[in-house]
Amino acid sequence: MTTEPPLSALDRLRQRVAAQTAAARPEAPVSVHGHAQGSPAGESRLLEGLNPEQRAAVVHAGGPLLVIAGAGSGKTRVLTHRIAYLVETERARPGEILAITFTNKAAKEMKERLTSLLGPVAHRMWISTFHSACVRILRAEHDALGMRSTFTIYDSADSLRLMNQVCREEGIDSRVATPKALLRRISDLKNELIDPDGFARSINDEADVTVAAAYRGYQNRLRAANALDFDDIIMTTVGLLQSHPAILEHYQRRFRHILVDEYQDTNHAQYVLIRELTGRGESMGELTVVGDADQSIYAFRGATIRNIESFEDDYPNAESILLEQNYRSTQNILTAANAVIANNPNRRAKRLWTDSGAGEKVVGYVADSEHDEARFLVEELQSLSGNRRWSDVAVFYRTNAQSRALEEMLIRAGIPYRVIGGTRFYERKEIKDALAYLQVVANPDDTVAMRRIFNTPRRGLGAKAEDAVALHAQRHGISFGAALDDVGSATYPREPVSGLTPRAEKAIIDFRTILEEARAMAESGSAPADVLDSLMAGSGYTEELRRSDDPQDEARVENLAELHAVAADFKKANPDATLGDFLEHVALVSDTDQLPDGDAIDEGDITLMTVHTAKGLEFPVVFVTGLEDGTFPHMRSLADPVELAEERRLAYVALTRARENLYITRASVRSQWGAPQELPPSRFLDEIPDGLIDWRRAHSSADVLRRSSAPRYSKPSFGGSRTGGTVKPGRLDSGTGRLDGKTKKAAAAETLSPEDREKLAAAEAARAAEQTAEAEEVKRKRAAAAKQEEEKLGALASVKPGDTLIHKKFGAGIVRAVEGRGANMVATIEFDGRSKRLMLAMAPLSLPD
DNA sequence: TAGGTGCATATTTTT
DNA sequence: TATGCACCTA
């Protein structure tokens, strides 16, 4: 990102013109105004090749502008060209521009495009996500907030830990209100800009009293820890601007031009933030928002389509421009997508079209199982392999769990792939631990991080020691971290922490020393990676992982090495960066940002991701899998028309990612956590006109059996119904693309030295011997368990809705529903107002006497 | 206090 | 299926 692109003819011209105009007007160093080479006289090159609507959006001046941009209609092009055009025509200086995106990746892409259009002056613009922009403002204005600039950003896992603490300490019964549900509520409140006081005033039922207490307790603790959660970042910024007119004016003056991408995904807080920054009346800044209500897929996070739908009411003199011409997909793909989205009620009519021709039909396949679906995918990939690069292909699914079956088959076929998202790097335990160490170094008051690592790795500090320190902290109104300073000796007027064994005291003092050393390093400007090393070595964290014989811990060491590399890279890209900057980067950057950027890959891998992650991307070949009612649309949306509409928009997003070839597949039986379930076709499939689909297989085996009035409950047959096309592993060149975590491992195994390989073999032999001994024991145990289970199942197998069962913990409950069979039988049971899904084989359930 | 076991819980989606 | 928490025991 820091390397500058090579000079193009345009660049050279730009520099020459810039030199001329700079002499006349030092304010505008980059104007290419008036240059007319290769374009109609007097016309900017930035308008070339735009259709009339796009052009209108680029040149629009004056009042607020709403660009409704259908999928693939050249939205990013319009945004970047509009910004460049503003600068070129001298209506704006680069420093006056604030462009907001939702993802770091989109921001990065926009920066790159603008740099290539305008040159390095693009760096003077603020092009960032809502969250980074707000953090930047908050760090600059921390004094006005009464916070230290070293504040920590809590991710949802940190928030959850903190909420658990709140529940424990405030005596909130976590069965009445789970910490997760409380956080959900609080997040909604923050997105609506309602603070604890505001909420307390509006309470009207008993349950809200708990929420109010939790909210207040949670917020107080965040403050005490000098920390903000994700939602706070926006809400606090809005609060800051609203309560400090001088600061607000400063930013209003600075950002004369505000552009917001994906406006349909803004929530109320973000909406207000933009409104405040834009200002009103005479001095109002120029606002451009771009979005597509049909692609709003983040309502669950507080996004509201209302913002885009009522833009014209919010800004009465607004102009709207509709971009319907699609430059991405074939007409068949667009017609399919249009047909699906047309089923959503109350939407503003919009129909994408293209002049690029009908293209191929959409290919459909009905599989018997998720394995069969994966096999179809692999077979198609193999037949494509001659004329496509792997990186042309993307496979989408509704939920991350679905990637598993696909991955297994891809591995078997030797097709290189990468999974975006899933178990995120930064959510791994060892990474969170390591970051907690760094966080505590940067912000000693960060209680969540401090308590996380207090006894990690184990240093003999258990609950007792932790309680003693926490009590001391509470008694003196200081943070947990500050309380550690009072172990052994203390600063007047405080006394030393009491209630610690000498052993615990020693352990704490050692722990403190490690942190102090690291803090000294950080303050003297050491690189974050070096601070990390010092902490991991000093605390014995890496050592403990290395000694462990859990194979997972080996991967953990590798992950820590990866984190080290990330820190080193960051330092390289930002030489002046502090430890705090690194932590901020990590907190605000998602794994989605590791998506390969277009041309950076040659052969590459195929890409697997959720539909949400796919938003904003495009691929020549797209597989949309799992089109079953219950999978996509998701189970939880089936009963609610509002949620179902969001699922449909999600389907619309999925279909419109495809440029040339679109595949849609479903599995008639899919196993979700163990139990196979038969699922009907997705309603979205029915919404696609039949003539558009080339069905390779239109019915599952179960369908066929049922039709020929075969016994209803024959076991669904897995695969086997298709002839030919057996998978031949190794038939394909698996590509020289970059390696992801998985392929890397395989590569490592191949490059082992002979000695290492011998060692490996010996270790494996020893393990095998051990295992045979263990296996006997395990077999015996398993037989006993099976017998027990069988006895229990025998008693419970006939349970049906309406029956009463007794649970060891929850007491008597009424069975509401029963799913699955045999060992996988799951019952939904209602206990005293709370309903639980329990596995009959596992749960401590018994029949009433 | 550590380590084992049992069991509940989860599968939406993310800055 | 896999993970993580809560409880119990050594």
Image: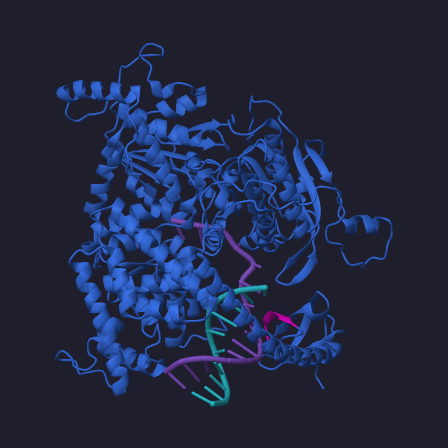
Chain colours: A blue, B purple, C cyan
| A366 over A784 or under it: above or below | above
Location of residue A531 in the rendering, given as x and y in whole percent from the top left corner = 24, 60
| A481 over A442 or under it: above or below | below
- The quadrant of the rendering that contains the C terminus of chain A is bottom right
Name the side, left or right, on which A546 lies relative to A570: right
Query: In the rendered image, which quarter is residue A688 located in?
Result: top right
Name the side, left or right, on which A570 lies relative to A359: left
- For the record, the magenta segment spans A832-839
Which residue corresponds to the image point at 43% horizontal and 29% vertical from the top-left? Answer: A320
In this view, the residue farthest toward the right is A709
In this view, the residue farthest toward the top is A41
Callout count: 0
Which residue corresponds to the image point at 87% horizontal and 49% vertical from the top-left? Answer: A708
Location of residue A366 in the rendering, given as x and y in whole percent from the top left corner = 71, 45
- The quadrant of the rendering that contains the N terminus of chain A is top left
Answer whether residue A696 is visible to the viewer in this image: yes
Magenta region includes residue A277: no
Pick whichever, B3 or A620, lies toward us. B3
Pick whichever, A442 or A817, lies toward us. A442
Name the side, left or right, on which A484 lies relative to A178: left
Answer whether residue A317 is visible to the viewer in this image: no
Q: What type of secondary structure mainly makes up the magenta span?
A: strand
Location of residue A250 in the rendering, given as x and y in whole percent from the top left corner = 20, 42
Which residue corresponds to the image point at 52% horizontal and 27% vertical from the top-left? Answer: A326
| A430 over A598 or under it: above or below | below
Pick whichever, A716 or A124, lies toward us. A716
| A439 over A680 or under it: above or below | below
